[in-house]
Image (cartoon, rainbow, N blue to C red):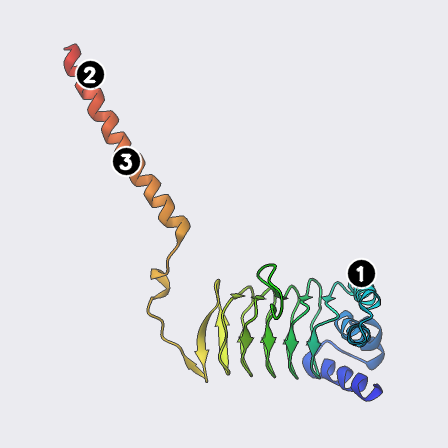
Amino acid sequence: MFDRMKEDIAVVFEQDPAANSKLEVILTYAGLHAIWSHRIAHALFKKNLFFLARAVSQVSRFFTGVEIHPGATIGRRFFIDHGSGVVIGETCEIGDDCTIYQGVTLGGTGKEKGKRHPTLHNNVLIATGAKVLGSITIGENSKVGAGSVVLKDVPTNSTVVGIPGVVVIQNGVKVKRNLDHQDLPDPFTDRCKQMEDKIEELQKEIDHLTKEKERNWS
């Protein structure tokens, strides 16, 4: 247990240049506290002590701002930077050497039973505010860009960005898309254009009726 704790502390120094001392990390890093609390909650969960497990996780959530379901499986050297607003669902599986930032959600997409949360393979990075939803897999050494919403599996060695998330880099090579950025569909703009066309059509009809009325009066 103490070896794992030392390993967790070492990861903080590797990942966060703002870390100055071990005492500072141990006492003030909420992400680290959340991981340590989760290990206790997960051990209770595996012993079918579900209420105690949830109680530990909720106390941890109150103090750290990080919500990790006791059923989630988390590997070694997991790093949560800042941590505020992070949510990790019950059936999540997270490999070794993964990093997530504040506001990340590893969640489900509905009320389905069974495996309903993401699986992160080793060395995955999920950037600030990203949402990874459903029983999907994020391949080894992949990255999810800030604010992205990922709903489909991501291959290994890939970078995903956007809403919904699309692979833009794979194995160090930029992925060509069928559509250029300026050609991507925009439902809001399309709807506004339809309304403008309808207004123009109605205006022409009003002008026509007005002219007909003026001719009848004359």
The amino acid marked with disc number 2 is: Lys
From the viewer's side, name the closer residue of 184 and 150: 150
Quadrant of the snapshot with the C terminus = top left
User: Where, by quadrant of the figure, is residue 97 drawn?
Assistant: bottom right
Label 2 and label 3: CA atoms lie apart by: 20 Å
Residue 39 on image: x %, y %: 79, 76
Residue 38 on image: x %, y %: 77, 73
Residue 215 on image: x %, y %: 14, 15
Question: Residue 200 — which label?
Answer: 3
- Which residue is disc 1 drawn over? 62
Q: Is residue 78 above or below residue 208?
A: below
Residue 104 on image: x %, y %: 63, 66
Label 1 and label 2: CA atoms lie apart by: 71 Å
Q: Is residue 98 left or right of residue 1?
A: left
Q: Is residue 60 left or right of residue 137?
A: right
Q: Secondary structure at mark 3?
A: helix
